[in-house]
Amino acid sequence: MLTVTDIQTFYGPSQALFGVNLSVKAGELVALMGRNGMGKTTTIRSIFGLTPARSGSIEFEAKDLRRLPAYRIAQAGLGLVPEGRRCFPNLSVRENLVVTARPGYWSLAGVEDLFPRLAERRYQMASTLSGGEQQMLAIGRALMTNPRLLVLDEATEGLAPVIRKEIWSAIRRLKKEGQSTLIVDKSLSELLPLADECVILEKGRTAWAGQPDALDDDIRDRYLGV
Amino acid sequence: MDKLKSETTALPSLPALPGAWFDRKGLVQIGLLALLFLAPLAAHLLGHIYYVNLASRITLIAMAAVGLNLAIGYGGMVSFGHAAYFGLGGYIAGISAYHAFDYSLFISWPLAIPGSDSMLVIWLAAILLCGLLALAIGAISLRTTGVYFIMITLAFAQMMYYFANSWPTYGGEDGLPIYIRNSLPLVDTGQPWTFFLIAFSGLLLAMAITSRMMKSRFGAALTMARLNDTRLATAGISPYPIRLVAFVISAMITGLAGALYADLNGFISPTMLSWHMSGELMVIVILGGVGRLYGPLAGAILFVMMETLLGGMTEYWKLFLGLVLLLVVLFAKHGVMGWLAGRERHV
């Protein structure tokens, strides 16, 4: 459903992406991996038109996304959970969820069922939530827009192990329900069993792509430093 | 994990909306409204017309600032040109009365539009025309942000100012008097107390609209656009039309206040369109508390009282206004309302 071909992206004069290729098929969970600074977040920013790619192509369900403004890209069916718990701190949990909602499979009840903590905190300001709850809220907010492709950027980074588990079990449930997902994460032990495809970036290029079983120690050592 | 869940469910959940009228904030708000209503009532009963008119002035300035607060405080759009709407509203009242007075036509072609001394007609015209003007100005200005937005809104307002200044038909620089206050059916608008009640209703209506709007989904989206527009865009909502609608509503409120203000003074001049006016409205919003529903009211009371009391003592009263503004900005960042009533959740 999403095909990114050879995109090159610049921050001002400095080039960050030198040719990234990746594709996500319907119902798949694709892991985008690589060490810090290799271009994972920039790739996501380019897909969403936040830092538009200067060349290459980004196609989603046969629609060219490359020259669209960010809100049109989201309307086309992409949902972003940005890095670092990006909620709207001065709005209530419910407002965060409902304001950008679009009709579809996911409703307020569905999201509150997936993350019961959000139901308990419905009327609290998002700023009073714990880091993990804010992350759940960010995921819930993206789901409420009923994206056909969900993009998670470092969804479990810096969270307590218990919360991490809760979020991973939610991601597993999403996958079981057929949600197509592109995910950036560093915890390979949880990510790899779920992933259908892996894409590894190295210095702004796609360096390796394949199925998680093919990801041997040699490749891990070379590209991921683990 | 199960243990953790049971712990969190044991926590009490907050009520839907802390709608308490009698907490600190509620009391301050009721107090301000009561002050604004009861002081002129007392003056009316004692026969001090001057103070009734002073209260009307505070009320209408507050109403204009309520409009501006919607743009600046809730929408994060720092407009330095709201005098354009305030003044246009005023000129609509003035021009309409002028033509009604000598039975001439405002426009004779393509269709004949006569003047009118009916407030209802004037209000409707002020709301519509200020909305249209704001739609045009906003559509262009909102493509910019930050200091460019401030400058471009100022530039449009100054265009209006110089246009009014150089258009002799309606008095140009000298302004235009409204000899007889425009009228409403059933009531005598010439009575100061009656006029105060009209102005007060206008202020309450403007505040009710603002409050209702900010509690709606639209209001939350406006807050999102202010806090982080890319985050809103990546959820599939373009911030631009949301801001534009809020900007237009903001201008309509300020324009209606302007139409009433012209009737209060019985006079309209380009001063109402000048950047001083925009600045004063902005000072009132900041004094009262940016993004606070009752902020413009608190700010207008403080501003007009300082102008009246200090202005009576020295013509350099703006020096003291400057000092107060400095103190507020440095030590009470959320304005008088933040200082009296505590912090607001949306700010």
Image (spheres, rainbow, N blue to C red):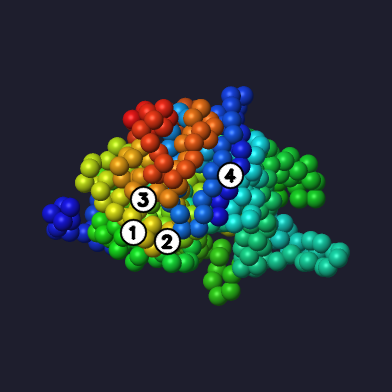
Give the mark nearer the N terminus: 3 vs 4: 4
Q: Is residue B84 left or right of residue B46?
A: right
Mark 3 lies on a secondary structure that is helix
Query: Which residue is disc 1 drawn over?
Result: A173
Q: Do the residues labelled 2 and 4 touch (CB within 8 Å)?
A: no
- Chain letter for mark 2, please: A
Q: Distance between the residues labelled 2 and 3?
A: 12 Å
Q: In this orientation, which residue lies closer to the viewer: A32 or B231? A: A32
Specify the label residue A4 is tagged with.
Answer: 4
Asked whether the residues under marks 3 and 4 belong to the same chain, the reply is yes
Q: Is residue B85 left or right of residue B206?
A: right
Which amino acid does the dot numbered 2 rest on?
Answer: Gly
Q: Tell me the chain of label 4.
A: A
Q: Is residue B118 left or right of residue A46?
A: right
The residue that mark 3 highlights is A194
Residue bearing the label numbered 2: A178
Instruction: Classify B329 as above or below A173.
Output: above
Q: Do labels 4 and 1 share a chain?
A: yes
